[in-house]
Image (cartoon, grey):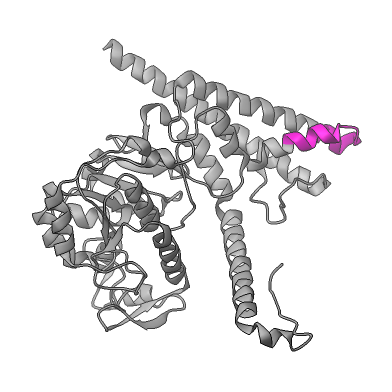
Amino acid sequence: IRFTIPVRLNQGYMLFRKQYEIFLKNSLDYIQQYWKNRMTLIHMGRLWCKNIFQNLSLVKETNTINDIKTSKPVILIGAGESLEESLSYLKEKRDNLFIIAVDTSVRTLLSNSIPPDLIIILESQHANIYDFYDTRAFSIPVAADLTSSPEILRKFKGKKYLFLSKFDNCSIIDLLKRENLCPPIIPPLGSVGISGLYIASLISNSDVFYTGIDFAFTPDKYHANGSPTHISMMFNTKRTNPGGFFSVCWNGKRERITDKTGNHAYTDLVMKSYKETLNSLSDFKKNLFNIGFKGLETSIQLYDFCKLDEQIEKKQEIISTLEKLENPSPEYNNKKIKDFLTGQIDILNNTVEMIVNFINNQDSKKTQLLNNLNLINYTWIFFPDASITPSLNITFLKRVLFSASWFINIIENSIKMLDYSSDLSTDKKAF
C-alpha cells in the first residue's frame, strides 16, 4: 500500500466528515511512516546487524544504561544554536548538574570547559567521527546503541553503557534476548537528541531539562559555535569562498518558519518529523522541560533557568526507573558471547548448505529451510523485495547465500577480536 484515496459513495460521509478526515489522515501518516522506516532499513539494516555482531566483542567490558544512577538534576545538551545561550549557566552550575551530551555537542562543551557526565552515541556510520577530534572525550562515560559504530566505540576508555534501539522485528534481537545478551531496549526514535531525552527521563524520576535541540536554524548557522560543522565552516571559509554555512543550509529543500523568538529561521522535513516524534514522546513523558529559546515550537513547556535552579535546591534523591524497560539486566561473559557467535556461524553454514542443495536439485526440505531462513532473517531483512516471511525464489536465495557468507566472515572476525581482547586482559592481569 502506497497511498489512501477516499471514495465517497453517498452523503453518509457528510454526517461524520471530521471523523472520516481524521481516519484518512491517520492512515496516510501510518503509510508514510512505514515507507520511511522501510527505506531506512533497506539502506542501513545490514550495517546495523553487522555492528551488533562486532560490538558483541566489546560488551564484556561494558555495563548497560540500567547502571546509570545520579542524584543530580539531569540536563541533555544538543548542538543547536540555543546551546550558546546556556553555556554560561552550565559552566556556573556544572557541579550541581548531571550533564548528558549528544555526540555533536561534545566539542562545544569541552571547548567551554564543561565536561559532560555522559555522551550519547547512536550513529552507526562514520558520520560522527569529527565529533571526537578532541581526545578528552574518550575518557568520558558513553551510552551507546549496540548498533553504533564499533570503530568509534572502541576508542572510548571510560565506562560504556549499552542500549539497543529496536529497529525492526529482526531475529538477531530475539536471539540475543534468548541468550540474555540483549541490552535494555528503547523505541526507535531516529534522532540522537530524542533518544538521549528518553534515556535521561529513565535515569531520573524528577524533571529533565534540555537545550540545543532546536529543529531549526538561521541561514548562516547550522549548529552552535565550536561544533564540528562550525569548525569545518571556519576552516573552509576563504576570501573566494566566504559563504560559510549558507552552502550547507541551502543544500536541500528548506522551509522558512518563525521560531520561538519571533525571528525567521529555516527547517526541513526531517527536522519537522523529529519535532513530531518529540511531541509524541512528551505525551507520556511529562517530566521534560525545554530551556532553549530558539528553534521550532513544540508541545514541551519552555522554562527559564529559574526552574532548573529550583530543581537544584530541592536536592531530591533520584531513582532509576529503567526496570520498566524490556530486558534491563543482561549477563555478559566471554564464554557466553563466544558460544553465541559460534552458534550463529553453525546456523549460517547449515543454511548455506541447504540453500545450495535446494538450488541444485530442489530436494531440500522446504520447511526446515524456511525455519532456518527465519532464524537468520538479519541476512535478508534489508533486501528491497523482502517481506515478513522469506521466499524460496531462486534469485532471493542466491542473494541470501551471498549475504550469509558475508555475515560468517563478520562473525569470525568478531570472535577473533573477542579472543584478542581476552588474551590482552589476561596479560594485563599477569603483569
The residue sitting at the front extreme is 15
Image quadrant containing the N terminus: bottom right
* Magenta-drawn stretch contains 357: yes
Q: Position of residue 96 (x, y in %)?
A: 13, 48
Q: Position of residue 233 (x, y in %)?
A: 28, 68
Does the magenta stretch mainly form a helix, a strand or a loop? Answer: helix
Image quadrant containing the C terminus: top left
The residue sitting at the left extreme is 92
Q: Is residue 139 above or below residue 8?
A: above
State which region is magenta: 355-372
Q: Residue at x 47, y 73 (%)?
A: 269
- The image quadrant of residue 284 is bottom left
Q: How many marks?
A: 0
* Magenta-drawn stretch contains 403: no
Q: Is residue 148 visible?
A: yes
Q: Is residue 35 above or below residue 417?
A: below
Q: Is residue 162 above or below residue 74?
A: above
Q: Is residue 348 above or below residue 385?
A: above
Q: Position of residue 23 (x, y in %)?
A: 63, 73
Q: Residue at x 91, y 34 (%)?
A: 361
Q: Position of residue 288 (x, y in %)?
A: 31, 59
Q: Is residue 370 left or right of residue 312?
A: right
Q: Is residue 79 visible?
A: no
Asked whether 409 or 30 is in front, the reply is: 30
